[in-house]
């Protein structure tokens, strides 16, 4: 764990501009703990030995009794969170070892009480939708605009939020995702204005936007655009450990004590120190060198764009409302399936973050260089050239972005209701008791409480037949569905 950080701070000249020691208290504590020669009588049970189950546990140091005492007397976590709050100009920052999933669910608990209504983007990740179950909130759905040329979502229109708030003036918050999984960027400032006109907070799932606000070519981060809170993953576009995330909030419209309780209520009581230390290290790296490192990401994405766009009918997404660090390859014009391309990329040792029929999304980050991007581009071109080419086609919007199922029950009521498992055709016209989503991106086509429609079932079956994994359903083959009894 944290091998890249350890090498960075230990095997380089201390005057190296990327040396992070001294500016990252959790990282400092992690490096000290892994070299102090102690004999801990705390968990984890491997006691830092690698001869029992292997190197898989190397570097696994806990927060309690590892980076700090069991009573947290050194205060290194609080110090690191305060530094992150200052960097994003937030009143509150909390680190999470449960990914943006934990952050989203904590924010759902923080914005309302059971039975309260909230305006929610229907294309939010499943974690926020299940946060509605935990908090007992009633969603008032809004949807982002779809680009008719690409079938991909942009941002949620501010007018849609205003209309929803007029329809339900008792709504307690607005919850949206920005940037989208495919790099679409909405007008967060306009969304904040629409929410604040009604005196309610805007909460943003910015899992893919940890780098926003740290380069002039990128959008400002959500708080800088007027949002009241956002959650972001430090392990997606920043070089932190898997499951590393941050919750950042300004508390004029949010109860700071409730938010703190919500984070604690949904967090593990055994946080992994390596995950926390990597979050702190990524924050320090972004603070000191973000612009320079993001310069490189932008240059690499531009290189990939120039080599891919127009070759074999490929198109690379670009535009004023698109994150320029996001590499999104459109395949409809090439007449090939993204699932087939992905299969060849995996065989070539170049897996990508997402593939569906018409779209390929490789993630380029600060850890990439010209060599890795050249390998990616070459593998994509080779894969497309080797596949049988069909005629160019119109993009088919993913069911995750395009299918609307009517809401019959609140997600919480449907989740806890007695349910039955029925053959999928018999589920049409019944209320879904489960969450069903093509993955990635993990955006549900059916959420608990929604009516199973023929359109939704057909869209899920089409995605499954094309090669998509159907996630979270009890029966991923879609032979049966769980419905409210």
Image: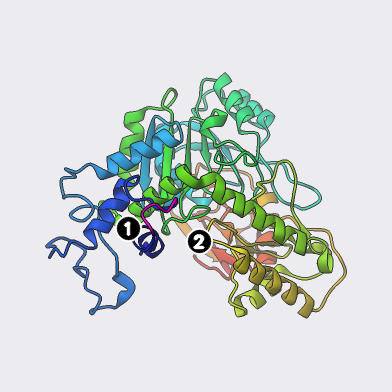
Q: Which residues are magenta?
A: 13-17
Residue 274 has which mark?
A: 1
- The residue wearing badge 2 is 472
In the rendered structure, which disc, 2 or 1, sits on the residue that comes first in sequence?
1
Asked whether 202 falls inside the magenta stretch, the response is no
- Report whether residue 209 is seen: no
Across and down, in percent, residue 122 comes to: 60, 44
Across and down, in percent, residue 383 comes to: 72, 76
Across and down, in percent, residue 178 comes to: 59, 42
The residue tagged with tag 2: helix, strand or loop? loop
Asked whether 14 falls inside the magenta stretch, the response is yes
Up the image or down, 420 lies above or below 165; here it is below
- Report whether residue 401 is seen: yes
Q: Nearer the viewer, mark 2 or mark 1?
A: 1
Position of 179 with respect to 117 (left or right) is right
Across and down, in percent, residue 407 comes to: 59, 43
Dividing the picture into quadrants, the one containing residue 221 is: top right
Q: Residue at x 85, y 63 (%)?
A: 393
Up the image or down, 4 lies above or below 322; here it is below
Q: CA distance from mark 2 to mark 1?
A: 29 Å
Query: In terms of depth relative to the viewer, which is nearer, 322 or 79?
Result: 79
Q: Residue at x 49, y 65 (%)?
A: 474
Point out the residue furthest to the right here. Answer: 391
Query: In terms of depth relative to the viewer, which is nearer, 217 or 360?
Result: 217
Q: Residue at x 62, y 38 (%)?
A: 216
Query: In terms of depth relative to the viewer, which is nearer, 48 or 361?
Result: 48
**Which image quadrant: the N terminus?**
bottom left
């Amino acid at each position: 764990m944290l091998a890249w950080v350890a090498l960075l701070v230990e095997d380089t000249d201390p005057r190296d501009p990327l040396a992070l020691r001294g500016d990252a208290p959790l990282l400092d504590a992690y490096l000290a703990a892994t070299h102090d020669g102690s004999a801990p009588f705390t968990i984890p049970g491997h006691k830092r030995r690698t001869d029992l189950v292997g190197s898989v546990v190397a570097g696994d140091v806990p927060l309690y009794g590892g980076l700090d005492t069991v009573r947290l007397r050194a205060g290194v976590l609080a110090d690191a969170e305060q530094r992150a709050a200052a960097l994003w100009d937030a009143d509150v920052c909390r680190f999470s070892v449960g990914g943006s999933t934990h952050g989203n669910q904590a924010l759902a608990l923080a914005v309302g009480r059971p039975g309260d209504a909230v305006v929610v983007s229907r294309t939010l990740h499943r974690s926020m939708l299940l946060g509605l179950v935990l908090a007992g909130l009633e969603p008032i759905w809004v949807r982002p605009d779809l680009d008719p040329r690409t079938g991909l979502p942009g941002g949620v229109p501010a007018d849609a939020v205003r209309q929803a708030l007029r329809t339900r003036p008792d709504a307690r918050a607005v919850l949206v995702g920005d940037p989208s999984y495919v790099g679409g960027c909405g007008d967060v400032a306009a969304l904040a204005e629409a929410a604040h006109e009604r005196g309610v907070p805007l909460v943003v799932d910015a899992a893919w936007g940890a780098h926003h606000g740290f380069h002039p070519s990128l959008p400002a981060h959500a708080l800088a655009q007027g949002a009241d809170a956002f959650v972001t993953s430090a392990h997606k576009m920043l070089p932190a450990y898997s499951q590393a995330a941050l919750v950042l909030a300004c508390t004029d419209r949010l109860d700071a004590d409730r938010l703190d309780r919500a984070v604690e209520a949904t967090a593990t009581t055994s946080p992994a120190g390596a995950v926390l230390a990597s979050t702190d290290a990524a924050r320090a790296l972004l603070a000191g060198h973000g612009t320079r490192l993001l310069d490189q990401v932008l240059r690499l994405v531009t290189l990939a764009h120039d080599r891919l766009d127009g070759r074999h009918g490929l198109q690379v997404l670009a535009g004023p409302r698109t994150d320029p660090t996001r590499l999104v390859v459109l395949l409809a014009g090439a007449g090939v399936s993204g699932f087939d391309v992905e299969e060849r990329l995996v065989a070539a040792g170049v897996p990508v973050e997402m593939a569906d029929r018409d779209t390929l999304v490789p993630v380029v980050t600060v850890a990439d260089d010209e060599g890795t991007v050249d390998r990616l581009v070459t593998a994509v071109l080779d894969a497309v050239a080797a596949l049988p080419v069909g005629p160019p086609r119109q993009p088919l919007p993913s069911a995750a972005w395009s299918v609307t199922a009517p809401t019959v029950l609140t997600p919480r009521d449907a989740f806890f209701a007695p349910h039955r498992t029925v053959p999928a055709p018999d589920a049409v016209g019944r209320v879904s008791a489960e969450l069903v989503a093509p993955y990635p991106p993990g955006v549900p086509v059916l959420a608990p409480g929604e009516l199973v429609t023929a359109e939704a079932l057909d869209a899920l079956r089409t995605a499954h037949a094309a090669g998509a994994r159907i996630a979270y359903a009890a029966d991923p083959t879609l032979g049966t569905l769980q419905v409210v009894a």
